[in-house]
Amino acid sequence: MTAHDVNTIADAVARKYWHAVAFESQLASGPVALSLLGEPIVVARLDDNVLATYDRCPHRSSPLSTGEIRVDPSGTECLVCPYHALHFDVDGRPTHLPARPDERLAERLSLITLPAQVSHGMVWVSLAEQPIGGIPDWSTYDDTANVSFQLGPEPWAAMPTRIVENFNDLGHFATVHANTFGVGEGAEFAVVPTVQIEPHDVDGATIGLDHGVTMHQLDRVTLDGPLVPILADFDYRHVFPFVTELRITYGPDRVEWIQVAFTPTTSLASATPATLVFQQNVRNFDLDGDVPAWHDFQAEVNAEDRRLLESIEPDMIGVDGTDAHEASLGFDDVTVEYRRLWRSAIAAERA
């Protein structure tokens, strides 16, 4: 199969999983629109619940995301179509039409609702009726004893699989991130040790990868921080297909968590792939420190990755490495295992 064929099947696989579509805080401003695997969708908070649906009114196809949230005559919060003000409740049922308030609204006007959950600062949606996999446990973000910030959502012109592989890659720290936290090429601390990889299983099913290593980075969380190498533990928990949490332990009392979700806005088979990058950073130290400076430091780290990933041509390869024409190095174990997960999922989808 070609990369296009593989990625077309991968679309069907990815539709079955949960994807980050918004930060919970975004819902306070009204409906949120985005594209998920090429499907325009909208999410809105109604009566403390979340409605997720395709972004078109079943009456005359206007985008519901350009409407607003109102209360219907029964006191129910609704998403209101911008064209004829047709009201929809959180279950997608049409409840009110101002131009004909007494008219019985047909069942076929109901919205197709999508599974949606708010969890640990993010809104998650699946395009499948019964999602598989899981939503990550990022409860450290909710812990008020920690300090945190959110970054994004930011559109990157790259495949989500490339971004996943990059985030889980240790070999690029010394080069790509030499101006932020990398120890620099050729430094005695730049050697990448052997990575320990284990399947991440839930109820007997593998839903991702756990891997970890102890190596050096610069002991800094701001752009003006010290240029002093420190030995740190890097522990990754990847939840298939596009979600990872990295826990960095700088010593017995200092821990930082970086929680990322890479949401494909285009089809995985698109020749011009695009991804929304969601990120949350949490730490249990320096609680009164300069959070904006920490945010700016992480934004620069991301910019270093983004510049590199968006420069790769051709970007469109198979999610499992098909047509990549790429060789692997000794520290590519995690990418190899990640692509193996994709090959297994694609084979199961074809069976």
Image (cartoon, grey):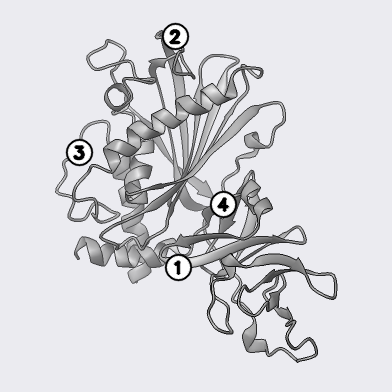
Q: What residue type is labelled 2?
A: Pro
Compared with 147, 44 (above or below) is: below
The tag on residue 226 is 2
Q: Is residue 207 left or right of residue 217?
A: right
Q: How far across and down, in percent of the image, does residue 121 sit?
A: 63, 44
The tag on residue 176 is none
Query: Disc 2 or disc 3, which is closer to the eye?
Result: 2
Q: Which of 231 and 299 is in front in this view?
A: 299
Sooner in the amino-acid sequence: mark 1 or mark 4? 4
Sooner in the amino-acid sequence: mark 3 or mark 4? 4
> How much space separates mark 3 and mark 4, taking CA atoms?
35 Å
The residue under label 4 is 22
Q: Which amino acid does label 1 sit on?
A: Glu
Please tell me how crowded label 4 is: few (under 14), some (14-19), or many (20+) other residues with Cα within 10 Å.
many
Q: Can residue 114 be seen in this view?
A: no
Q: How far across and down, in percent of the image, does residue 150 sit?
A: 56, 37
The residue under label 3 is 328
Q: How far across and down, in percent of the image, does residue 199 sit?
A: 44, 43
